[in-house]
Image: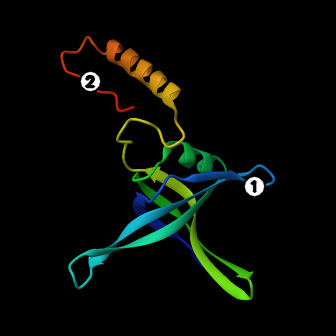
Amino acid sequence: MLNRIVLIGRLVRDPELRYTSSGVPVSNFTLAVERNFTNQQGERDVDFIKVVTWRKLAETCAHHLNKGRLVNVDGRLQIRKSENDGRTYINAEVVAENVQFLDWPKDNQGGANNNNNNNTNNNNNNEFNKNKFDDNDEEFDVPF
């Protein structure tokens, strides 16, 4: 049997990073994914799909992704059931096994958890790379 989900969409908000009681990192975020067809008004409906990442992938997503970023998520569908006050709740989510970043941050910041010190270090690295390639007549822009 096969349980495989592939999604391309944009983050609705910054990922949340938490740790389990045993110290395992877990990150949650929601993807906005457009449908492949239009509705009667000629607009594309959007599905909001919950995504969960674990361990190193969770930390990487939490540190480098933020609201609006375009990503490809490859994983599996998981259905969780819970009961509260006699009601049964069913929650569908995608457990990501791989997340690919499909765009660059607009402000050259890594993600939501970066601070000004990281920006300073990135600017110093860009200056180094710029000076290293000054021998060329063409402008060279380092993408990070």
Q: Nearer the viewer, residue 125 or 18?
A: 18
Indicate the amino acid at tag 1. Thr
Left or right of residue 104: residue 13: right
Indicate the amino acid at tag 2. Phe
Q: Which residue is mark 2?
A: 140
Q: Position of residue 63 (x, y in %)?
A: 55, 42
- Quick one: which residue is furthest to the left in this view? 137
For label 1, the SS is loop
How many C-alpha atoms fall within 10 Å of the one at disc 2: few (<14), some, or many (≥20)?
Answer: few
Quadrant in the picture for residue 37: bottom left
Q: Nearer the viewer, residue 36 or 67?
A: 67
- What is the quadrant of the C terminus in the image? top left
How many C-alpha atoms fall within 10 Å of the one at disc 1: few (<14), some, or many (≥20)?
Answer: few
Instruction: Give the mark, 2 or 1, whose residue is nearer the N terminus.
Output: 1
Q: Which residue is mark 1?
A: 20
**Residue 130: which numbered mark, if any?**
none
Q: Which residue is rendered at x = 36% and y = 37% of the image?
A: 107
Whole-Å distance between the Cαs marked 2 and 1? 44 Å
Q: Which residue is rendered at x = 29% and y = 27% of the image?
A: 141
Q: How is the image coloured?
A: rainbow
Q: Position of residue 39 (x, y in %)?
A: 26, 82
Left or right of residue 91: residue 86: right
Q: Which residue is rendered at x = 51% and y = 28% of the image?
A: 118
